[in-house]
Amino acid sequence: MRHSVSIRDEIGEEVESMAEEEGLSISEFYARAAESYLKRLRRRRAIDELDRRGGSIDAHGDLDEALGDIRQDDPERP
């Protein structure tokens, strides 16, 4: 699939530099970045759903502690 996007010059320059250092094409670099971001979004949505259903889940152990651990792994999660 092909997409055209516009990004700030300084980001594009850094991407080009990092992709070259990592031995990746620009396309592969952006594809990996998008995959990583999508994974974080899916995870965050799953956490939000667990939070929403929190009162109705019958779980063994401490659900709040488990959710806290998951949140700690997500640097963009407040």
Image: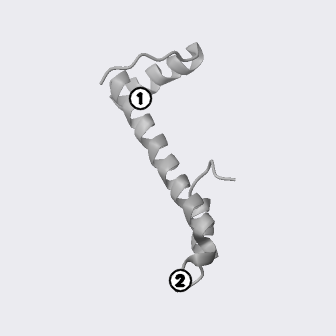
Q: Position of residue 2 (x, y in %)?
A: 33, 20
Residue positioned 45% across, 48% down in the render? 39
Q: Are marks 1 and 2 in contact (CB under 8 Å)?
A: no
Residue positioned 51% across, 58% down in the render? 46
- For the view shown, which residue lies furthest in the bottom direction? 60
Q: Nearer the viewer, residue 26 or 3?
A: 3
Q: Position of residue 71 (x, y in %)?
A: 60, 60
Using the rendered view, name the quadrant where residue 47 is placed.
bottom right
Residue 19 in the figure: left or right of residue 53:
left
- For the view shown, which residue lies furthest in the left direction? 1
Residue type at tag 1 = Tyr
Q: CA distance from mark 1 to mark 2?
A: 40 Å
Residue positioned 51% across, 15% down in the render? 6
What residue did someone put label 1 on? Answer: 30
Element on which disc 2 rests = loop
Q: Nearer the viewer, residue 8 or 15?
A: 8
Is 8 rendered above or below residue 33?
above
Q: Nearer the viewer, residue 43 or 17?
A: 43
What residue did someone put label 2 on? Answer: 58
Element on which disc 1 rests = helix
Residue 24 in the figure: left or right of residue 68:
left
Q: Position of residue 77 (x, y in %)?
A: 64, 52
Q: Position of residue 53 (x, y in %)?
A: 58, 69
Q: Residues within 10 Å of mark 2 (few under 14, many from 20)?
A: few
How many marks do you count on the picture? 2
Is 4 rendered above or below residue 62?
above
Q: Earlier in the sequence, mark 1 or mark 2?
A: 1
Pair 1/2: label in front:
2
Residue positioned 57% across, 13% down in the render? 9
Using the rendered view, name the quadrant where residue 63 is placed.
bottom right
